Image (tube, rainbow, N blue to C red):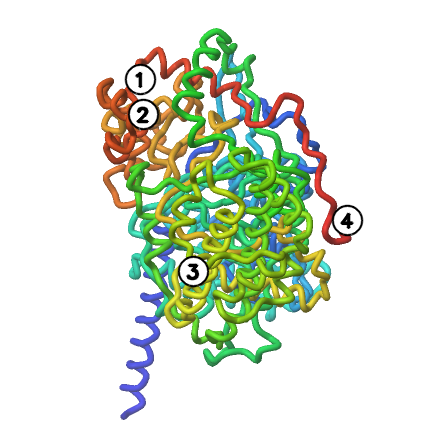
Amino acid sequence: MSKGIASRLIWRLLVLALLLLLAAVGIFAFFVNSSKERVPGFEQVDEYRYLNSGWKAASREAYYHTPQGTSLPQGAGDAAVRYNWFLNLEQPLSTERFADPRFLLRFKFLDDPSHPDDLPVGFAKRYSASLGEELLDISCAACHTGELHYNKEGKRFGLRIDGGQAMHAFTDLQRGSFGPMLISALAETWANPLKFNRFADRVLADGGSKVKLHRQLGDTLEAFLNIRQNNPLAHLYPTREGFGRTDALGRIANTLFGEHLTDANLQRSSAPVSYPYLWNMWKFNWVQYNGSVAQPLARNVGEALGVGADIQLINAEGAPLPADQRFRTSVNIPGLEKIERALQQLPPPNWPEDIFGRIDRTRAAQGEQLFQNHCVECHGPHRSSRARQMAEAPLKVGPEDHWLIEVIGIDHVGTDPTEAQSFLNRTYDLSATGITKAQVKELIDPLLQKKLARDMLMRLQELSIDQSLSEEARVAFTALADEFPPPDQLAEQGFEPSPETRIKQALNYLGLKPDTQLSAAYDAYPQLSCDTQCQVNALWYDMDHAQQAYTKLLASIDPANISEGLGLNLIGLLLKQRYYEDNNLTEAQQSCLEGFGALDLPQQILGYKPRPLAGVWATPPFLHNGSVPSIYQMLLPAAERDTTFFVGPRDYDPVHLGYVTSQPPGGEFDGFWFNTALTGNHNTGHSFAASPRQWQAYRNDPSANPLPSGVIGPELSDEQRFALLEYLKIHRDNPPGYRYRGAPACLDQP
């Protein structure tokens, strides 16, 4: 090739490269400018008011500022966003700070006047020992703190609901959302020498290498772009989450089993949920919308993993790690304990009468009777017996702080089934971690045996006070309960391996001789005439069948094909076990950290939990998926509810107890239109729609005259609906003057 031809070719290539560069710059500029147009407007607040009165400032600050071990992007390890990067990053196509409060609050994060660096609620920092640097940590307060806005007498109030529901769109990838804008800022800083030099001069004010900083910035940008579940071509989240929601379980599973393990585990999910409110939640015996988790620490660890905590499940080649290196994580377990203890002191919010209007006490009294007739059966709170509290949460002070949560089947409650079904039906392959079925049995069997022993003692204690039994029988069962060894100790000693002989040995240990001819005796068990021997037989029968169920469960758990719930449970157990071993924690410390000695065994029921309703007026929109905008509409027949409404602005409607749902003038991008026709968004169920004849027939004989699926009560008059709304403004789940004394700290920490 002649020199002339070569020169022309090189020139053309240079021109082409320049044109491609200009095109890339143009596309980037168009993307950023069109994104800026879509950033929600700033919501001006003239006066803030904190409605969870009685919560100490120290508890609020611990909740707002304590890191939980997460990073951006999710599980990025050494490629995570450093805290001082975030403080000094510029907005894309601007020299203004990205962390400018007026800019960040436009994404509907919440102002935190106590934050040392003027960042929003839940933006914390954590120290990475491997990097020797502080990382940006998004803590649980970012998603579980709410705010209501209201204009009165020319002043705009911001009413803070600590432990309430956030309204940001943190996981939304639409233009104008927080995530795409942050990535754009990082990309321009990395690519634009002028912008990078300004950034580096601030970040490296105390010294450091610009070359290293540029490489680290590129690694972080690459980590963001390599999050496979956010690839728009994958379309893994077809139902838009939008404002105030996230596809929680789908994202936790995709992050843990997909991003951290194998692309083959990434699955589509169309089940966005609202962020649940947190006051009194520590009292529940089952948490999560589908009532799937019993242990507070397990709930919090799962949330931290989903938000972006690091955990290495395999090595760089995709092979299992050595056994002594598995399941280490950045999850900040001492921090989670600190947050949990702060939330145990959190009271529900109080209705601000001087802002929203005075409560009509006469109407509220009428509403209280309606609440007792139509709501309390499901929503309670239902306080535990002492025996059950000791079996499920033995470190709680008493049964008044242990509330029983019943999961209602989707066929009955009729609400959108997508989340509940996905939790049971999605399966994953965890075999790449090296976990074997034998290890699963070794891990879970002791927990099942502890539960079995605890349940046995609970039954004996319940029988000791059962007024349907003779006094002689109650005395006998009281003696047996008093002589029963500590359940956890009995479980650790172990029973014979045979499912049948395990229960026999336990009863023989107590001096009982169950009759193995059970049918006649067990048929008589519910009857008042059932004597001591009959009750012993029933106890043997129930415990034997429980053991058989446990044996069947253990045999069914296959790490290569495991359900979402069991998979999350298994990884959580292994993570906690590694932490306990690495930190030489005692059994007592472990039980305390886990939450009142609760066992980490999942529950898998196709349904949703109805939770107690103190402060519910402050937590719109409603149902697990946020598909009903107000409590007023929750009391309507489902067919009469809004099928579309605007979500994003936080203006409150104190008449209907919900958000104002019309699009504000010029506020096209201040929220999104919620469409209840989409999968995961249905607003069906929990419907007060029974005719008077249907309702009367149902009350006379529920089994013979069941209500249609999704119908839970009679159609109410408007007068009745507004009476219920009035009562919910003052409803309390705890008795007057209640104040939790607080549990002792599990670990020595400031």
Q: Quadrant of the N terminus?
A: bottom left
Determine the residue positioned at 67% across, 57% down. 590
Compare marks 2 and 3 and give the one earlier in the sequence. 3
Cα separation between marks 2 and 4: 50 Å
Is 437 above or below relative to 599?
below
Q: Are marks 2 and 1 in contact (CB under 8 Å)?
A: yes
| Residue 138 image point, x, y percent | 56, 50
Q: Are marks 1 and 3 in contact (CB under 8 Å)?
A: no
Task: Give amino acid for label 4.
Answer: Pro
Foreground: disc 2 or disc 1: 2
Q: Secondary structure at mark 3?
A: helix
Cα separation between marks 1 and 4: 52 Å
Q: Secondary structure at mark 4?
A: loop
Foreground: disc 1 or disc 4: 1
Q: Secondary structure at mark 1?
A: loop
Q: Nearer the viewer, residue 532 or 35?
A: 532
The crowding category of the residue bearing disc 3, from other C-alpha atoms within 10 Å (few below 14, some 14 to 19, many at least 20), is: few
| Residue 263 image point, x, y percent | 37, 69
Determine the residue positioned at 31% across, 45% down. 417
Residue receiving disc 3: 549
Q: Are marks 4 and 3 in contact (CB under 8 Å)?
A: no
Residue receiving disc 4: 750
Compare marks 1 and 4 and give the one earlier in the sequence. 1
The disc label shown at residue 716, or none: 1
Compare marks 2 and 4 and give the one earlier in the sequence. 2
Cα separation between marks 4 and 3: 44 Å
Q: Nearer the viewer, residue 347 or 175?
A: 347
Foreground: disc 4 or disc 3: 3
Residue receiving disc 2: 713
Query: Is any part of residue 35 visible from this angle?
Result: no
Q: Are marks 2 and 3 in contact (CB under 8 Å)?
A: no
Cα separation between marks 2 and 3: 35 Å
